Image (cartoon, rainbow, N blue to C red):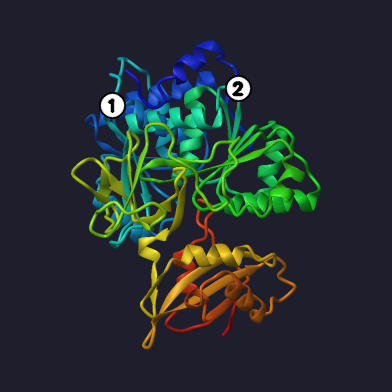
């Protein structure tokens, strides 16, 4: 019976002393990893019933992945907690999910020292094994629930689309609390590829580990990739071993293609679009030459439908809500909810993204429904304005918000971070740039320069933190407002 991580023991049998996982100065062999997974599975199965939620309260590292795979092996659900959650939020999530037990740094050693006296029954492909957390519309994050079957299908899609195999060396750039990075790390261990991860994202250290271990595959967000390129160029470093850079979470601008080739000469950026609830919706394979604005086409086994607000299928190239159907969809929410996430009666799912499909089956995203700004009765997707701003050579990052205004309903406010903090961008230059590339009603009314740009654990812009910082009830920060 197949399940996530079922090949870990087999990989250990082939090469017990080979490294399976490296994190900083820690190196875990295939044999040790397989033993720890079985020990965790046995210990969990002795303490809780099959299918129970089990908290994982560990930072990035080998212990985290052994624990995650052990809980999955036991047929239980791993609730992946974020060490950075404030106490109140953590308590709310615990109350909502009611973990039977929680494994942290103090209990990991105890669980892996116990003697195994019986075999743990294999989980079913249909069993839920993972609950991750992402922002929701209630007071607590959404706890999305995934089955073994959904991730096994996702592994197969990734291997086919990107040519991944046990011969690769995966370098995971971000936090395992982020589903993109966790997926990459677990997939690597599942197929027997060497997995290299870090305690935290620091570009210099990522590049050092890339060179030291001759990484061939990098898993990163577009923002992380930007900082890796910027750091490599500044240090005049080249990394010829990297052949594939897998990125998701936002559209890679592609403006740094020339710079990418200078520091990663053999690498191709392979993008994919999806969500924590869906896995892959579209992919851009390594050898594909597609329009820059497209997020690719659906891989085999995935269907896409673009529909209007009433659920009717729209015409080709007409914008509507993106619906998807595949074997990779999530089971539901363990806690929290989202008004944008909907199922229909035939197994189709939408998470609220809007976009359109061309005659070649290529998908183009316009934005997320819950970020849409309505100004002067016109619907504006912040992502479109952000892409235009980030295409300016002096803008490193951008985020766009709607601020209530009596006349227009909302006005568009753009925050940006300059490429060179020593050189101030003239706001009129940015305004003219937007007017040349956007419809009049989509041009921001206000521009805010931000020097200290907040990022999430996953390496994306932390929109909520930035919003609170820019629009507090009172107080001031390190921002300069330019109307």
**x, y percent for residue 149:** 33, 29
Q: How many marks?
A: 2
- Tell me if I can see residue 80 in this picture: yes
Q: Residue at x 35, y 53 (%)?
A: 315
Q: Nearer the viewer, residue 30 or 35?
A: 30
- Name which of mark 2 and mark 1 comes first in the sequence: 1
Q: Nearer the viewer, residue 112 or 243?
A: 243
Q: Residue at x 73, y 49 (%)?
A: 258
Q: Residue furthest bottom?
A: 407
State the image quarter where residue 449 is shown. Answer: bottom right
Q: Nearer the viewer, residue 76 or 7?
A: 7
Q: Which residue is mark 2?
A: 167
The dot on residue 45 is: 1
Graded by Cα atoms within 10 Å as few (under 14), some (14 to 19) or many (20 or more), the crowding at tag 1 reads: many
Q: Residue at x 52, y 81 (%)?
A: 445
| In this view, the mark in front (2 or 1) | 2
Identify the secondary structure beneath mark 1.
helix
Q: Residue furthest top?
A: 14
Q: Residue at x 73, y 50 (%)?
A: 259
**x, y percent for residue 243:** 66, 33
């Amino acid at each position: 019976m197949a399940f996530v991580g079922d090949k870990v023991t087999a990989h250990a049998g082939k090469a017990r002393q080979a490294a399976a996982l490296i994190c900083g100065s820690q190196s875990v062999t295939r044999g040790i990893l397989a033993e720890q997974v079985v020990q965790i599975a046995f210990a969990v199965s002795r303490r809780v019933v099959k299918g129970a939620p089990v908290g994982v309260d560990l930072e990035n590292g080998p212990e985290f992945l052994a624990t995650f795979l052990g809980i999955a092996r036991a047929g239980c659900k791993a609730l992946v907690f974020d060490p950075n959650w404030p106490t109140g939020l953590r308590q709310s999530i615990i109350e909502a999910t009611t973990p039977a037990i929680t494994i942290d740094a103090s209990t990991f050693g105890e669980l892996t020292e116990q003697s195994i006296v019986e075999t743990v029954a294999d989980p079913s492909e249909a069993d839920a094994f993972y609950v991750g957390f992402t922002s929701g519309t209630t007071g607590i994050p959404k706890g999305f629930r995934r089955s073994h079957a959904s991730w096994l299908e996702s592994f197969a899609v990734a291997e086919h689309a990107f040519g991944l195999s046990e011969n690769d060396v995966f370098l995971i750039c971000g936090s395992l609390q982020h589903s993109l990075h966790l997926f990459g790390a677990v997939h690597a261990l599942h197929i027997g590829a060497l997995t290299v991860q870090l305690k935290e994202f620091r570009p210099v250290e990522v590049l050092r580990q890339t060179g030291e271990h001759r990484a061939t595959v990098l898993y990163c967000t577009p923002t992380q990739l930007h900082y890796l390129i910027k750091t490599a160029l500044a240090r005049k470093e080249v990394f010829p071993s990297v052949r594939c850079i897998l990125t998701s979470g936002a559209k890679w601008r592609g403006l740094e293609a020339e710079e990418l080739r200078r520091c990663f000469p053999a690498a191709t950026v392979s993008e994919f679009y999806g969500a924590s609830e869906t896995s892959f919706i579209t992919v851009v394979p390594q050898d594909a030459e597609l329009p820059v604005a497209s997020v690719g086409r659906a891989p085999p086994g995935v269907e896409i439908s673009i529909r209007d607000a009433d659920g009717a299928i729209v015409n080709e190239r007409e914008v509507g809500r993106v619906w998807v159907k595949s074997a990779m969809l999530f089971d539901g929410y363990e806690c929290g909810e989202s008004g944008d996430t909907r199922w229909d009666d035939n197994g189709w799912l939408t998470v609220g993204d809007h976009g359109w499909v061309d005659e070649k089956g290529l998908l183009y995203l316009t934005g997320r429904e819950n970020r849409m700004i309505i100004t002067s009765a016109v619907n504006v997707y912040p992502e479109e304005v952000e892409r235009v701003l980030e295409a300016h050579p002096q803008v490193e990052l951008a985020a766009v918000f709607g601020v209530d205004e009596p006349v227009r309903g909302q006005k568009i406010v753009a925050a940006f971070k300059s490429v060179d903090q020593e050189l101030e961008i003239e706001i009129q230059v940015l305004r003219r740039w937007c007017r040349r590339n956007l419809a009049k009603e989509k041009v921001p009314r206000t521009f805010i320069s931000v020097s200290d740009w907040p990022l999430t654990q996953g390496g994306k812009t932390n929109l909520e933190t930035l919003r609170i910082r820019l629009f507090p009830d009172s107080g001031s920060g390190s921002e300069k407002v330019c109307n």
